[in-house]
Image: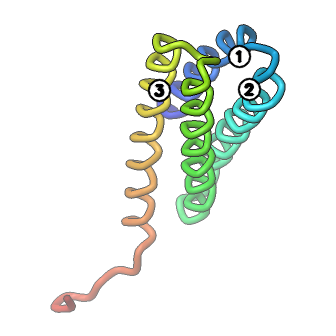
């Protein structure tokens, strides 16, 4: 599944950066980001194996957790615990995953919406 591959790639990049964070953030924000990444991978993986009508809640969870990762990474960058180059590289990967999850969410909403009858507006 392409979104899972991109997410895995983003996590591997994050993990390289995580080990170099200053100790003041490695065990606080860094640990939380790491945990959220794992939960996002778990929710995405779970959604990929479910029936179409069961996927939506898991995709929403993955989107919410990815948004939280973005905010926490921004804090790391603003506090200079993550340099510009690393922040940009990670943000690009996470944004791509976010677009993919958003597209998947839209597709699921469309598939799961009640069908309109001919002539209804």
Between 28 and 98, the residue placed more toward the observer is 28
Measuring from the top left, give residue 18's x and y in whole percent.
71, 16
Above or below: residue 119 compared with residue 30: below
Residue at 54%, 32% (x, y): give it. Answer: 74
- Tell me the SS state at disc 2: helix
Q: Is residue 5 left or right of residue 31?
A: left
* Residue at the bottom extreme, as displayed: 120
* Classed neighbour count for the residue bearing mark 1: other residues with Cα under 10 Å, few (<14), some (14–19), many (≥20): many
Residue 35 quadrant: top right
From the viewer's perspective, is 68 left or right of 84? right
Q: The residue tagged with tag 3: helix, strand or loop?
A: helix
Report how far apart the C-alphas of labels 3 and 1 lie in the structure.
Answer: 14 Å
Name the residue rendered at 47%, 34% in the picture: 97
Above or below 10: residue 101 = below
x and y, in percent, of residue 118 in the image: 19, 88
**Location of mark 1 (residue):** 18
Inter-mark Cα distance, 1 to 2? 6 Å
Q: Is residue 13 left or right of residue 88?
A: right
Q: Along the line of sight, which residue is nearer the eye, 102 or 14?
A: 14
Mark 3 or mark 1: name the one nearer the start of the chain: 1
The image quadrant of residue 7 is: top right
- Of helix, strand and loop, which one carries label 1? helix
Tag 2–tag 3 contact (CB < 8 Å)? no
Name which quarter of the figure residue 37 lies in: top right
Q: Residue at x 51, y 21 (%)?
A: 90
- State how far apart marks 2 and 3 are (Cα): 15 Å
The residue that disc 2 covers is 30
Q: Marks 1 and 2: CB-CB under 8 Å?
A: yes
Q: Which residue is mark 3?
A: 91
Question: As displayed, is residue 58 above or below residue 2?
Answer: below
Image quadrant in which the C terminus is located: bottom left
Q: First in sequence: mark 2 or mark 3?
A: 2
């Amino acid at each position: 599944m392409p979104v899972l591959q991109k997410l895995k790639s983003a996590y591997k990049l994050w993990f390289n950066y995580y080990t170099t964070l200053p100790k003041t953030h490695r065990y606080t924000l860094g640990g939380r980001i790491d945990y959220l990444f794992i939960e996002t991978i778990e929710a995405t993986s779970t959604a990929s194996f479910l029936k179409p009508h069961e996927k939506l809640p898991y995709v929403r969870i993955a989107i919410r957790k990815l948004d939280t990762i973005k905010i926490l990474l921004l804090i790391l960058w603003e506090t200079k615990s993550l340099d510009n180059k690393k922040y940009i590289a990670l943000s690009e990967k996470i944004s791509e995953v976010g677009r993919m999850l958003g597209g998947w969410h839209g597709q699921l909403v469309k598939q799961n919406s009640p069908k309109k009858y001919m002539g209804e507006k």
